[in-house]
Amino acid sequence: MTDARIAALDRVLEVTVLLGRDMTASLAGEGLTVARTTLLWRLRETGPSTQRALADALGVSARNVTGLVDGLVEAGLVTREPHPTDRRATLVTPTARADELLAGMAAGQAELADQLFGGMSPERLEGLVSGLDEVLERLRVLVPGGAAS
Amino acid sequence: MTDARIAALDRVLEVTVLLGRDMTASLAGEGLTVARTTLLWRLRETGPSTQRALADALGVSARNVTGLVDGLVEAGLVTREPHPTDRRATLVTPTARADELLAGMAAGQAELADQLFGGMSPERLEGLVSGLDEVLERLRVLVPGGAAS
DNA sequence: CTATATCGTGAAGTTACTTCACGGTGTAGG
DNA sequence: CCTACACCGTGAAGTAACTTCACGATATAG
């Protein structure tokens, strides 16, 4: 009876590995890395943010965010603006180029979703999503600091 | 109609993130890292292997395997034995301590599987697994070098 | 106006990767 | 036998993503 659960876990783990590979590869094609892109993606949702806020949102150290932002600045995807009221802080702001790029990535994401789930029977897709939702619920309890999108 | 697919992809992505965090954390508790453990796990399935074979199995460079094995040797989890017939190669062999540790990890894996899927209705679990299988099938086509367990 | 907390970053270190070069070894061809 | 050539593992050097610790600059509470 545990077998089925182990089998399920194996599937999830393998999906994880394959998907990670796919994302890393397709991002590398655009000269980006997963970490930097994650930051950019978050920025798209929240708008210009403090580095501290980004660090908290991503669950990494503030120092690390400094480095990621450095890379994104160099790539012309974000700028560091002075914070209007707090002179200690800097506001990380996406550039127009970042907006374009993110739009393209959203399209790519939709395409991937179609490739993975397109043509799948509605019942099966529904079963998948609801199953994953239940798993997610349990995972969030198990894993501390679950700050995901 | 694409929405449901995007939603599904989001779920998968989030599971990926959370599960990665959980694994990293619980391995860190035992003084291990994900990469080294992956190697050890593969070794458990295949038995003593050449570093080249491990590199191919894990899909990483041979040089990287050298480093990972270095760490595992230092941790007393594997030994480097001379290859019986090919004097160029070394056979990486798990120690008794590694066997114990891997047994414990298998138990931990079963426990995690129970935590994630235990008490889930059989239909839902079945729906999850079959859905993931279909996704995996498509992913393997999309992602090159899919050498997973 | 002083104590304290916070923001970002320099310095230093770890892990996981890569490519390139090279010495030691196996293996086929003449 | 002996010369190519392919292959095994590793030193050297480099990159990316992390970490902690220390520190200067600034905000903020008392």
Image (cartoon, coloured by chain):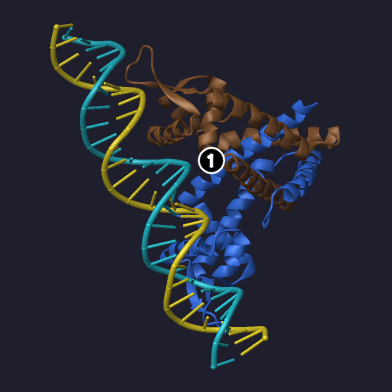
Chain colours: A blue, B brown, C cyan, D yellow
Q: Which is nearer the eye, B98 or B67?
A: B98
Q: Which is nearer the eye, A141 or D17?
A: A141
Q: Which is nearer the eye, C14 or A94?
A: C14
Position of residue B56 relative to residue A98, above or below, is: above
On the rendered structure, is A120 left or right of B58?
Answer: right
Q: Quadrant of the N terminus of chain A?
A: top right
Q: Position of residue B61 (x, y in %)?
A: 41, 35
Q: Which is nearer the eye, C21 or D27?
A: D27
On the rendered structure, is A137 left or right of B66?
Answer: right
Quarter where residue D29 is shown: bottom right
Q: Position of residue A134 (x, y in %)?
A: 79, 45
Q: Position of residue A34 (x, y in %)?
A: 52, 52
Q: Position of residue B65 (x, y in %)?
A: 43, 33
Quarter where residue C24 is shown: top left
Three-letter code, disc 1: Thr
Q: Residue at x 48, y 74 (%)?
A: A80
